Amino acid sequence: MSKKFLMKGNEVIAEAAIRSGCTMFFGYPITPQTEVAAYMSKRLPEIGGVYLQAESEVSAINMVLGAASAGRRVMTSSSSPGISLKSEGISYIAASDLPCVIINVQRAGPGLGGIQPSQADYFQATKGLGHGDFHLMVFAPSSVQEIADLIKTAFDLSDKYRVPSLILADGIMGQMMEPVSFSEEESTDQPDKGWATSGHDNKRAPNIVNSLYLTPDELEKTVIERYQRYDVIAQNEVLFEKYLTEDADIIVVAYGASSRISKSVINTAREKGIKVGILRPITLWPFPTQAIKELCKTAKSFLCVEMSMGQMVEDVRLAVEGVRPVSFYGRTGGNTPRPEDILHKIEQLNEEEK
Amino acid sequence: MEHNIIIAGFGGQGILFLGKVIAGAALIQDKNVSWLPSYGPEMRGGTANCSVCISDQEIGDPLVTKPDILIVMNRPSFDKFIGSASKNSVVLVDSSLIDKKAERQDIQDFYVPASQLANENGLSKLGNIILLGTLAKATKMFEKEIFYEAIEQAVPSSRQQLVKTNKQAFEIGYDFIA
């Protein structure tokens, strides 16, 4: 097995991106993700890449648009308020069918909010990171090792489908150190980007990257074609983890930091004889709707645990289609759910079912 | 094996570094481990703390709220965390900086004048590693050699001369208790 390092989540985001062939990074500092940019600023020049601290988030995301247009593997990183600033550019990137990886190490909102961890950008990430009809592929790691693994997936799938990827992390995932090992295989297999505006040397017709369509029929056709690609992604790229769900009466649904807190509670509840399991979405878009639907056959109720006032719970309810009750437990403002409080909620649900 | 550790004190005392050494020792022993620093405005105000979890099982919540090992290096941290230490926990107090004792009978508390010992031995700023030595002796969590290896890995390669002084500090703490 390859060597294990003790590294911060933020540093692993950067290292894994470089190992995935990312050669360009444009960003602007914001707590709690600044180590991503700091690491990139040290490493990218060493490998002949480009690190640039832009004058603002708006500027940084448009540099990403430019680098992606030229066919380079490119990444940007920010935290909640900074991602809001990037949203116009993200919509343009999606509308131009450009691949890239965007990192959101979430902090508490709304507004300037706070700097402690949060999951309150779920709606933004999965439903509307910008204007218009579009999606990003959204990945939610729950350990530092999973960050390393998902960054590569995010780049590969983004290139494959020409859809931008978003890593939805949070202050805990970014700041925490855990052991991590990196895949030994070099990831340089990038698909041919024949569409890139990388210079035609008078040997082919110029490529054009564009998101402006003034004829409604033409724009509608473009959007519908893009949605057909989204359908393929939804069919093939859903990722989730199930733990002790087979015989479970109660299914906890949680992602990222709140899923790992919930998972340890599952074991405690099992010791008390409560049949509870967890479904952890790893992709938030596409969402594991089918997997949740199937659990309705065996489970009596669902409990969604989030670091928000309740956002993913709406997707769980859509998946369950009213067949089973769906409860919610969350903390917000930068607080994390306490294991004993999650346990209390599970015990309550268990009592109600008797 | 399972340990949930809080280390707390002023910024600049090597609180986060001490946490990294303990986490590094756990990794050498192939344990599951997480290290989570406090981050934010309180650091500018002067205090720093970190949570370290070590376990044979998968680690869930990386934020420690009921430590079974507590190391405190200033009075505000002592006041903040002493009540949260779990029953039978090991509590290490830098008694040269904290003029108070825990009024609890259900914990194993050790009072080590770590910062003073560091200064007296020409090892200024190594009070944190003196406390690590005491911790190693008090808990037997890992062999001394494992901590030495973890120190070698945690000290940046450009400052390897500090490994020797760190080991001296470790020894002082180790020998402080019987």
Image: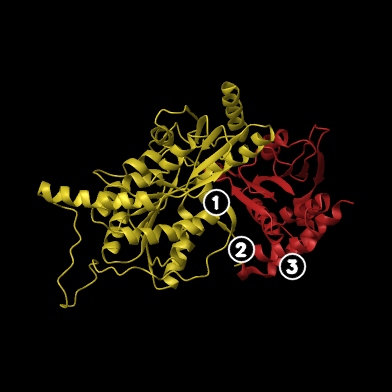
Chain colours: A yellow, B red
Q: Nearer the viewer, mark 3 or mark 1?
A: 1
Q: Are marks 1 and 2 on the same chain?
A: yes
Q: CA distance from mark 3 to mark 1?
A: 34 Å
* Quarter of the image where one finds residue B156: bottom right
**Horizontal side, residue A111 vs residue A295: left or right:** left
Q: Chain of mark 3?
A: B
Left or right: where B175 falls relative to A263: right
> Looking at this rendering, what residue extends furthest in the right direction?
B178
Amino acid at circle 1? Ser
Amino acid found under the numbered disc labelled 2 = Lys
Q: Chain of mark 1?
A: A
In three-dimensional space, the C-alpha distance between marks 2 and 3, rounded to whole angstroms, equals 25 Å
Which residue is tagged 1?
A: A143
Contact? badges 1 and 2 (CB < 8 Å):
no
Taking the spot 28% from the left edge, 53% from the top edge, the residue there is A229
Gap between marks 1 and 2 measured at Cα: 14 Å
Q: Which residue is mark 2?
A: A4
Residue A58 in view: no
Q: Quick one: SS at disc 1?
A: loop
Q: Relative to the observer, which residue lies in front, A195 or B19?
A: A195
Q: Please say whether residue A206 is visible from this viewpoint.
A: yes
The percent coordinates of residue A70 (x first, y second) are 27, 66
Give the total of numbered labels. Answer: 3
**Residue at (41% x, 57% y) in the render:** A154
Q: Residues within 10 Å of mark 3 (few under 14, many from 20)?
A: few
Question: Which mark identifies residue B4?
Answer: none
Please name whichever residue, A247 or A155, is drawn nearer the observer in this view of the structure: A247
